[in-house]
Every structure is written in C-alpha cells, then in structure tokens.
Amino acid sequence: MNKKNGDKEDEQDGLSVHSPCKAPNSSSSSLRKEQSQVDLELKLLEALEIYPPVKLQGIHRHFVLYGLTEYMRRSFNRQFSASDVLQMLDRFYNLEMLKPDDEDSRILNQVEEFSLPPSYFTKEGS
C-alpha cells in the first residue's frame, strides 16, 4: 500500500480522520429539529408529574388530556392538539392499555332513577 492510497483512506467525504469532526451544514437543521423534539418530550414528561397517564382512562380522560395540552401550550407558546399530545405519549406508553373496556362503558352509561326523599320537602318550621 502506498502513501497516496493511505491518505485517501484517512479522508472520507472531505474530512480527515485526524481532524475534529464537523457536521455538514445541511444537518444543522436536523440537529435543531432533534433538539426541539427532545425539548418537547422533556416538557411532556414534566407535565406527566402533574397529569399522570393512569388518569387518561375513565371519566377523567378528557380533563387530563386538556391539562396536558394546556401545559404544552404554555411551555412553548403554540397550540397543541389532543392528537399531538397523544402521539407524543404513544412514544412512552402503550395507550391501547388506557382505552376503556366494555365494563367501564357499561358502568358509565348505567342510568339509575333518582329522587329526593320526602323528608327533604317537609319544612323544618312545621
């Protein structure tokens, strides 16, 4: 192997293996995009301290989801939809496990007749 071939092996894509690595200019926008994605995920994890994902099931689901979207909106000064937040949550949790099952639906949709007791309508002074 001669010296010229060894130099070509040491340099690939215009960078020498002995020089500090510099990212090409085209990847700087992808690096910012990755950093913003990391920031989004960190803020979401902070929000989960206040709004735990276990409360995303049952009757509190919509309130918790609203709280998460509001937390993200305030953190980044831009709107987040519920589907945006659920998509980010799906990276960390199996959201299929949080969907209500048939038993929950049956209990929540159960209608019971209610009436006040007759003693409620009697006047205390009489």
Image (spheres, rainbow, N blue to C red):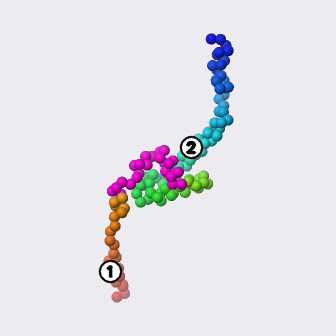
Snapshot quadrant of residue 15: top right
Residue at disc 1, secondary structure: helix
Residue 92 seen in this snapshot:
yes
State which quarter of the image contains the C terminus: bottom left
Crowding near the residue tagged with mark 1, few <14, some 14–19, many ≥20 C-alpha atoms within 10 Å? few
Label 2: few (<14), some or many (≥20) within 10 Å?
Answer: few
Residue 14 image point, x, y percent = 67, 25
Residue 76 image position (x, y, % from top left):
60, 52
Res. 18 in view: no
Pointer 1: what residue?
Answer: 119
State whether the magenta stretch is mostly helix, strand or loop: helix
- In the rendered image, which quarter contains the N terminus? top right
Looking at the image, which residue is at 56% across and 43% down? 38
User: Which amino acid, mark 1?
Assistant: Ser
Q: Residue at x 35, y 79 (%)?
A: 120
For the image, the number of numbered tags is 2
| Amino acid at the residue labelled 2 | Val
What is the quadrant of residue 3 in the picture? Answer: top right
Q: Is residue 83 magenta?
A: yes
Residue sitting at 34 percent across and 67 percent down? Answer: 111
Q: Is residue 40 left or right of residue 97?
A: right
Q: Which residues are magenta?
A: 81-104
In the depicted structure, whether residue 111 falls above or below residue 119: above
Check residue 50 for magenta coloring. Answer: no
The residue depicted at 59 percent of the width and 53 percent of the height is 75
Which residue is labeled 2 in the image? 38
